[in-house]
Image (cartoon, rainbow, N blue to C red):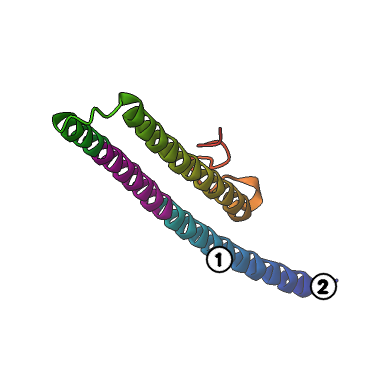
Amino acid sequence: MSCEHLHNEHQSWNKEHDQWNAELYQWRHESERATSCLRDLLARMESRARTLELHAIAIDTLVQKIAVHENSMACDCGEGVLMLDVHEGVRKEHARQGDIHAELGRRHQRLMACLAELEEILTPAGEPVMHCCAKTVGMH
């Protein structure tokens, strides 16, 4: 092989390396942008979950206030509502809130599984993209 041929081949390799580096830079930027979007989405979902939890607490408080008010009115009217009925109502509301909590837990687990899968897809050459590993956060 001639020196010129070897030189041309090396130049071709250098161009390929430059192209690969540009692609790697672009992929890293795209991965970082996607990760940022995922973090924003997670923050919005966590905020929504907190809002739902607060709504459930507010509803429970109102239900308990109504039950106490109804019991007070019934006692004032001489009907003598049994505290067991009030207790049963509170028990049902507690069970309903437990169902809401369980559903939030299931949704959280699905979200974390999706984030773990996306993290795996977005991880170039075995290097972690996200600083906080979605595979372990919140998985319990």
Question: In the rendered image of this protein, does residue 75 appear above or below residue 119?
Answer: above
Tell which residue pokes out farthest to the front in this image. 78
- The percent position of residue 38, horizontal first and vertical second, equals 46, 54
Residue under numbered circle 1: 22
Circle 1: element type: helix
- The percent position of residue 79, horizontal first and vertical second, equals 22, 31
Please state which of residues 55 and 2 is positioned toward the viewer in this rendering: 55
Please state which of residues 35 and 112 is positioned toward the viewer in this rendering: 112
**Quadrant position of the C terminus in the picture:** top right
Q: Residues within 10 Å of mark 1 (few under 14, many from 20)?
A: few
Residue at position x 21%, y 37% in the image: 70
Residue at position x 53%, y 61% in the image: 25
Quadrant housing residue 82: top left
Circle 2: element type: loop
- The percent position of residue 95, horizontal first and vertical second, equals 44, 36
The verdict on residue 48 being magenta is yes
In the picture, the disc for residue 2 is: 2
Three-letter amino acid code of the residue under disc 1: Ala
Q: Which label's residue is closer to the chain start, 2 or 1?
A: 2
Separation of disc 2 and disc 1 at Cα? 30 Å
Q: Is residue 78 left or right of residue 85?
A: left
The verdict on residue 20 being magenta is no
**Quadrant position of the N terminus in the picture:** bottom right
Please state which of residues 106 and 11 is positioned toward the viewer in this rendering: 106
Q: Is residue 103 left or right of residue 89?
A: right
Q: Which residues are magenta?
A: 40-63
Please state which of residues 69 and 57 is positioned toward the viewer in this rendering: 69
For the residues carrying marks 2 and 1, which lies nearer the camera in this image?
Answer: 1
Three-letter amino acid code of the residue under disc 2: Ser
Residue at position x 37%, y 52% in the image: 44
Tell which residue pokes out farthest to the left in this image. 76
Q: Main secondary structure of the magenta part?
A: helix
